[in-house]
């Protein structure tokens, strides 16, 4: 085949991702292509024509072009390049992290939108209508970021729906992104009834065929709206006019694997590239978003009343040091309240932020924890399947043997949701349902659990953070928080913020409709500042936490880069992190460096881990440090050593 043209192609491969291929005819950027890469076949996206080829190189020809027109727009390609630069990843890693290989290789599908009976209309309240009109007034004026801070039950979703209608009137598409698929069943039904068509859902648990249907339906413009988890943002669309990120504070929007992007920040960046409005919504905004709003970078809208004008439930603290405890789980006061509520035919939510049956298995002979053989972390015991599981590597152990003395007899300590359910059934009967990621093995099962609880089949729902999501249960009048102290004890500067957000979110599930709600929090340290701020105006918490962050030079008053080096040999990992540190110290006068030190979880999957934390007021200093670290790592790495660069990290374990 005679080559007249040469093209740079982004491939989802390591190390660099952009490679040049030849072709016999002209093709456009954004088209998908099939290529030979080494001994295997890969699929990629044409980035641009290369007019500066090296005549000494014999370029491979493209095998085939999959498209007649660009599937990925010029703005989409800009997003990939900008995202790669910011998160210090090569373009191939970015593409691999945001678009599945099966979609890059898939055949285009003709799909149809299903008509839905449009049977619901809800008039906005005065304050909802005011905010809706304000955002509508700027919807055609290019890029803007709008923070919608609305207390739980204030009706943020109703504003989203009306904004989506405005977007669709302009023949534009809307992306509605939520942090968890657990939020989608109720929202999808509401949206479909209000908009008159079946709203497609997109998330990681779909089958490849289901993903392809949504992917091509959005790309072709057949689906004017899509709702889903963070991967939804990266569906190449025909003409986006609005991006909504609900519960923008959620840590699950941060991807751990490379590229370690934060969905909220990428939505804002993509909106800027596209020149369209972005709406960030939350009852408890992230400190970064609140700070940007206070300083005028974002437009700020505050919904301070529930849709039915009911007050938020008062939050009471139960000092566990001064109360009797049943089965090491419930204070007698919380037990009495639960008993009272279910006798009145009302429902209860109980938050226990631990899965499994027991958090620790302790050897009866020597008193040592049963730890994972691959990771430096205790195993969680699951009684229902009689296995101990590592929450980091996923290894399952069916035969327990103490690594210290060889003992085989263990005591279980620390309640998980499985054990709590067992205890609650003994206390209250067969009226308990459990909601955590172990109980929810499919979208269908999640819907069944929610429907059963909504119908009143169960009186008590016990679960992890999942129960704090945006569910509407009219009959829930009591929320009990069984254990929150463990979250506040984590070595993480965001611990206060996360606890405040979780407690407010779960408290907001109580008394949302006619009946009054109550919230009881069990704690061994009721004097902690975060507890004292729960019943006050949210401004007081944000002021307190911003002052604390400012003193410590943590975000939003700095940018952070976390560098983690790991190896199967302890010394090799330590030598590499020390080498990187020595070079960074010489470069950085404008950057604070913390470490190097062993990571909080020192060993994961038989890899020893060391980390550095870099803090600076300027993004450019963080970027420069990251590039230097990458240069040192590339030059001196040997064998099995790995390095991870995490810009704006959310997790420090």
Image (cartoon, rainbow, N blue to C red):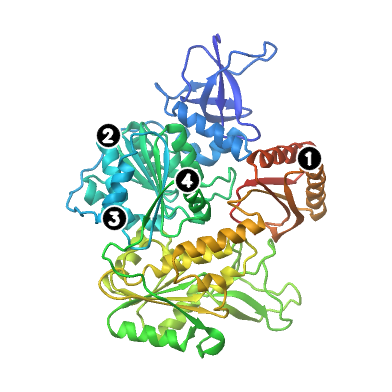
Instruction: Please determine whether, in this image, residue 382 is positioned above or below residue 638.
Output: below
Q: Which mark is residue 127?
A: 3
Nearer to me, 259 or 11 = 259
Tell me, yes or no, if residue 189 can be seen here: no
Q: Earlier in the sequence, mark 4 or mark 1?
A: 4
Q: Earlier in the sequence, mark 1 or mark 3?
A: 3
Residue 348 locus on image (x, y percent): 36, 76
Between tags 4 and 1, which lies in front? 4
- Distance from disc 1 to disc 3, alpha carbons, whole Å, reads 52 Å
Residue 219 locus on image (x, y percent): 37, 33
- Label 2 CA crowd tier, 10 Å (few <14, some 14–19, many 20+): few
Between tags 2 and 4, which lies in front? 4
- Distance from disc 4 to disc 1, alpha carbons, whole Å, reads 34 Å
Q: Residue at left 33%, top 34%?
A: 140
Tell whether label 3 touches label 1 (CB within 8 Å): no
Query: Quarter of the image containing the N terminus?
Result: top right
Query: Quarter of the image containing the C terminus?
Result: bottom right
- Distance from disc 3 to disc 2, alpha carbons, whole Å, reads 24 Å
Find disc 1 in the rendering and name its residue: 587
Q: Residue at left 18%, top 49%?
A: 118
Q: Earlier in the sequence, mark 2 or mark 4?
A: 2
Tell whether label 2 touches label 3 (CB within 8 Å): no
Local SS, label 2: loop
Instruction: Please determine whether, in this image, residue 376 is positioned above or below residue 291.
Output: below
């Amino acid at each position: 085949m005679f080559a007249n043209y040469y093209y740079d192609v982004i491939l989802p491969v390591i190390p660099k991702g952009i490679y040049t291929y030849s072709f016999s005819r002209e093709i456009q950027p954004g088209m998908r292509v099939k290529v030979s890469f080494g001994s295997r076949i890969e699929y990629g996206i044409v980035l641009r024509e290369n007019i500066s080829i090296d005549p000494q190189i014999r370029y491979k020809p493209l095998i085939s072009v999959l498209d007649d027109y660009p599937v990925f727009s010029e703005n989409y390609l800009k997003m990939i390049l900008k995202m790669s630069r910011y998160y210090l990843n090569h373009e191939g890693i970015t593409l691999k992290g945001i678009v599945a290989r099966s979609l890059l290789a898939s055949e285009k599908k003709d799909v149809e939108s299903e008509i839905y009976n449009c049977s619901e209309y809800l008039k906005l309240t005065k304050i909802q209508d005011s905010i809706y009109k304000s955002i509508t007034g700027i919807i055609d004026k290019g890029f803007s970021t709008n923070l919608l801070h609305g207390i739980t039950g204030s009706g943020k979703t109703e504003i989203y729906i009306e904004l989506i209608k405005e977007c669709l009137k302009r023949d534009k598409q809307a992306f509605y992104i939520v942090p968890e698929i657990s939020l989608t069943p109720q929202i999808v039904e509401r949206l479909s009834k209000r908009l008159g068509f079946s709203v497609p859902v997109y998330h990681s648990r779909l089958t490849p065929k289901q993903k392809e249907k949504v992917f091509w339906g959005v790309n072709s413009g057949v689906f004017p709206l899509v709702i889903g988890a963070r991967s939804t943002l990266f569906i190449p669309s025909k003409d986006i006019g609005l991006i909504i990120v609900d519960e923008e504070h959620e840590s699950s929007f941060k991807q751990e694997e490379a590229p370690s992007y934060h969905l909220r920040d990428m939505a804002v960046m993509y909106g800027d590239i596209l020149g369209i409005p972005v709406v960030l919504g939350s009852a408890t905004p992230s400190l970064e978003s609140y700070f940007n709003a206070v300083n005028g970078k974002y437009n700020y809208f505050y919904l301070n009343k529930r849709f039915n004008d009911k007050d938020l439930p008062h939050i009471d603290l139960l000092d566990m040091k001064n109360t009797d405890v049943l089965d090491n789980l419930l204070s007698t006061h919380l037990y009495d309240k639960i008993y009272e509520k279910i006798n009145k035919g009302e429902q209860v939510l109980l938050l226990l932020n631990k899965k499994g049956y027991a958090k620790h298995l302790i050897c009866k002979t020597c008193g040592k924890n049963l730890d994972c053989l691959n990771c430096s972390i205790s195993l969680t015991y699951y009684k229902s399947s009689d296995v101990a599981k590592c929450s980091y590597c996923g290894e399952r152990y069916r035969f327990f043997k103490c690594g210290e003395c060889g003992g085989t007899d263990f005591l279980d300590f620390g309640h998980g949701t499985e054990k709590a359910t067992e205890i609650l059934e003994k206390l209250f009967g067969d009226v308990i349902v459990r909601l955590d990621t172990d109980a929810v093995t499919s979208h269908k099962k999640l819907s069944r659990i929610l429907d059963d609880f909504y119908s009143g089949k169960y009186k008590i729902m016990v679960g992890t953070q999942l129960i704090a999501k945006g569910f509407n249960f009219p009959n829930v009048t009591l929320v009990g928080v069984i254990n929150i102290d463990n979250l506040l004890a984590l070595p993480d500067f965001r611990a206060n913020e996360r606890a405040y957000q979780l407690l407010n979110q779960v408290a907001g599930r109580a008394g949302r409709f006619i009946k009054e709600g109550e919230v009881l929090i069990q704690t061994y340290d009721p004097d902690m500042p975060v507890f004292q701020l729960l019943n006050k105006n949210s401004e007081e918490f944000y002021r307190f936490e911003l002052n604390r962050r400012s003193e410590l030079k943590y975000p939003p008053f700095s940018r952070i880069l976390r560098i983690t080096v790991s190896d199967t040999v302890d010394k090799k990992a330590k030598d590499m992190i020390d080498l990187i540190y020595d070079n960074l110290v010489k470069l950085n006068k404008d950057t604070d460096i913390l470490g190097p030190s062993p990571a909080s979880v020192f060993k994961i999957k038989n890899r020893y881990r060391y980390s550095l934390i870099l803090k600076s007021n300027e993004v450019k200093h963080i970027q420069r440090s990251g590039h230097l670290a990458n240069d040192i790592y590339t030059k001196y790495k040997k064998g099995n050593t790995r390095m991870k660069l995490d810009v704006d990290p959310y997790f420090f374990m």
